[in-house]
Image: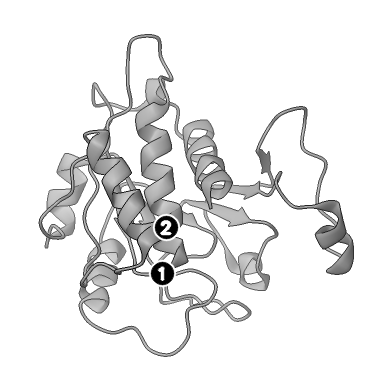
Amino acid sequence: MELAGLSCTTAIAKAYPPTSMFKNPPTVLVICGPGNNGGDGLFCARHFKLFVIIPGHKLPLSFPPRATKRPNKPLFTALVIQCQKMDIPFLGEMPPEPMLIDELYELVVDAIFGFSFKGDVWEPFCSVLSVLSGLTVPIPSIDIPSAWRVEKGNPGGTQPDLLISLTAPQKSATQFTGHYHYLGGHFVPPALEKKYQLNLPLYPDTECVFHLQ
């Protein structure tokens, strides 16, 4: 999860360099769900805070709590504490209007639901996804756009501008129509790659992401 979060931050920084943004400093909102995808988002937030992409210029991050009661798992509790100790702010609630988010942030990272999502979306996540659908700022999605089905996708769901596939692209990635698609998987053991016949690309040198599109 640590390396997945680093891969996500790296892919976002490559797709949207701070020098290409209008706000100084740039502002990013990360929305985390209650599962492993949310954990990836927490790691992503921490790496954002650590990156000094321009000398003397940090990429700040606003980070909201999960839209439901936070999981009581030790890992998530530790990740939240790490973010708090790094002065990463947590929003008290999700901004209710797309226009407000568009005004305040230049990127909104979707770390709500991952590949294990099944069934119907429940509240308050229905409202959160509804707000996301009205944004004009770019949305990077971690692993799979929230509420998409692993194989079938979801044409009516979140439509990100950047998709960061982790380990290997899901089947639904063929329906992705955004501008950037990166693969983060320079952490997969060769035995696992061989077992599942993943046929992963060769990552250049120490790069942790590979540009697919």
* Secondary-structure class at tag 1: loop
**Which residue: 62% across, 65% down?**
173
Residue 25 horizontal/vertical position (percent): 25, 23
Estimate how packed mark 2 is, as few (under 14), some (14 to 19) or many (20 or more) residues with alpha carbons within 10 Å. many
Q: Residue 108 or 6: which is nearer the viewer?
A: 6
Q: Amino acid at mark 1?
A: Gly
Where is residue 63? Give x, y as percent. Answer: 24, 47
- Residue lying furthest bottom: 119
Q: Amino acid at mark 2?
A: Gly
Q: Going by the image, does 8 lie left or right of 188?
A: left
> Is 23 located above or below residue 116 in the figure?
above
Q: Is residue 194 visible?
A: yes
Residue with the mark numbered 1: 35
SS class of the residue under badge 2?
A: helix
Q: Label 2: which residue?
A: 39
Q: Are marks 1 and 2 in contact (CB under 8 Å)?
A: yes
Q: Residue furthest front?
A: 74
* Picture residue at 48% right of the left edge, 85% below the top: 118
Residue 111 seen in this snapshot: no
Q: Who's the residue at 60% across and 68% down the image?
A: 175
Q: In the drawing, what numbered circle is on residue 3?
A: none
- Whether 47 is drawn above or below 143: the answer is above
Residue 69 position, x and y percent, is 20, 71
Instruction: Name the residue rendered at 38%, 89% in the picture.
Output: 120
The local crowd at label 1, few if under 14, some if 14 to 19, many if 20 or more residues have their Cα within 10 Å, is: some
* Residue 130 rendering spot, x and y as whole percentages: 25, 71
